[in-house]
Image: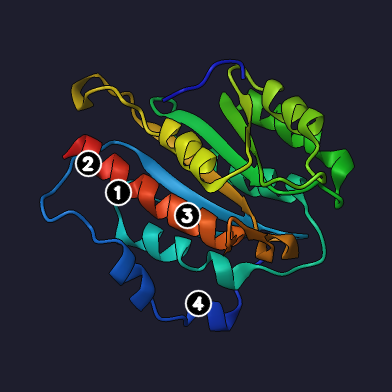
């Protein structure tokens, strides 16, 4: 649902990675669910990597791509401009009949190409894309004002802090339109997930990146239930 006011290629070993874990943690629905939404995934540290181009909301490939997030952690900083650039490029050819959204999650501050971020925000706004930003974790590194500037640069974007796994779960469920299928407008959503080294830090006994992985898989299951 909409809120109020708002590449580098995957390494060869990651592309060859077995998807057994994803198959155990998420199963595509047995029945065909006709949902007009499409969804994509970008992982970013000092560069951005498109883990999944747009696929239907319940495509097994998206769950498999989520399972790659822990393997993607690394890099030498945080480049929000690169993440937004990748998302904007994915969204550029999307038909206007679909609502366009970016969910950008980070646990720190951008320290690469920081001067280019607002240009990408302006590009999002020009493409009629809303950006929701999520400051994840308890770290003092998060710049709430910076994330507000990013989200508020689009028409109905919103900044949302998530200091715990439960808070993140609640926020990501907000990305699922709770309207009945017959009243639902199709959406094209890109999730941009910070995979800088600090995402290996613990939050509530789990690595932050593992919390994100499990929460995103839970979001898919929740959406599936809403549409079944």
Q: Which residue is mark 4?
A: 15
- Mark 2 or 3 closer to N-term? 3
Front-most of residues 49 and 191: 191
Q: CA distance from mark 4 to mark 1?
A: 24 Å
**Earlier residue among tags 1 and 3:** 3
| Residue drawn 17% across the image and 43% down it | 33
Mark 1 Cα-neighbour bin, 10 Å: few <14, some 14–19, many ≥20? some
How busy is the neighbourhood of tag 3: few (under 14 within 10 Å), some, or many (20 plus)?
Answer: some
Q: Quadrant of residue 152?
A: top right
| Residue receiving disc 2 | 225
Label 2 element class: helix
Quadrant for the N terminus in the image:
top left
Find disc 1 in the rendering and name its residue: 221
Q: Which residue position is annotated with label 3?
A: 53
- Residue at 62% over, 20% down: 6
Badge 4 marks a residue whose secondary structure is: helix
Residue situated furthest front in the rendering: 205
Horizontally, residue 199 falls left or right of residue 176, namely right
Whichever of labels 3 and 4 marks the residue nearer the N terminus, that label is: 4
Near mark 4 (Cα within 10 A), the count class, few <14, some 14-19 or many ≥20, is few
**Label 2 to label 3: alpha-carbon separation:** 23 Å
């Amino acid at each position: 649902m909409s809120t109020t006011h708002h590449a580098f290629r995957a390494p060869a070993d990651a592309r060859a990675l077995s998807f057994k874990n994803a198959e155990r943690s998420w199963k595509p629905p047995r029945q065909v669910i006709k949902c007009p939404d499409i969804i994509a995934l970008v992982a970013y540290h000092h560069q951005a990597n498109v883990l999944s181009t747009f696929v239907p909301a319940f495509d097994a490939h998206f769950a498999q791509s989520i399972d790659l997030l822990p393997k993607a952690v690394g890099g030498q900083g945080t480049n929000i401009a690169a993440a937004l650039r990748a998302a904007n490029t994915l969204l550029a050819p999307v038909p206007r009949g679909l609502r366009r959204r970016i969910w950008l999650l980070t646990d720190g501050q951008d320290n690469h190409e920081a001067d280019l971020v607002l240009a990408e925000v302006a590009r999002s706004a020009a493409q009629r894309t809303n950006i929701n930003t999520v400051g994840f974790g308890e770290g003092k590194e998060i710049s709430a004002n910076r994330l507000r500037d990013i989200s508020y640069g689009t028409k109905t974007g919103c900044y949302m802090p998530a200091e715990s796994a439960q808070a993140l779960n609640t926020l990501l469920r907000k990305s699922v339109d709770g309207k009945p299928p017959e009243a639902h407008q199709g959406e094209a959503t890109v999730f941009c997930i910070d995979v800088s080294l600090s995402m290996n830090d613990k939050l509530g006994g789990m690595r932050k990146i593992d919390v994100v992985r499990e929460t995103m898989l839970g979001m898919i299951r929740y959406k599936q239930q809403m549409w079944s």
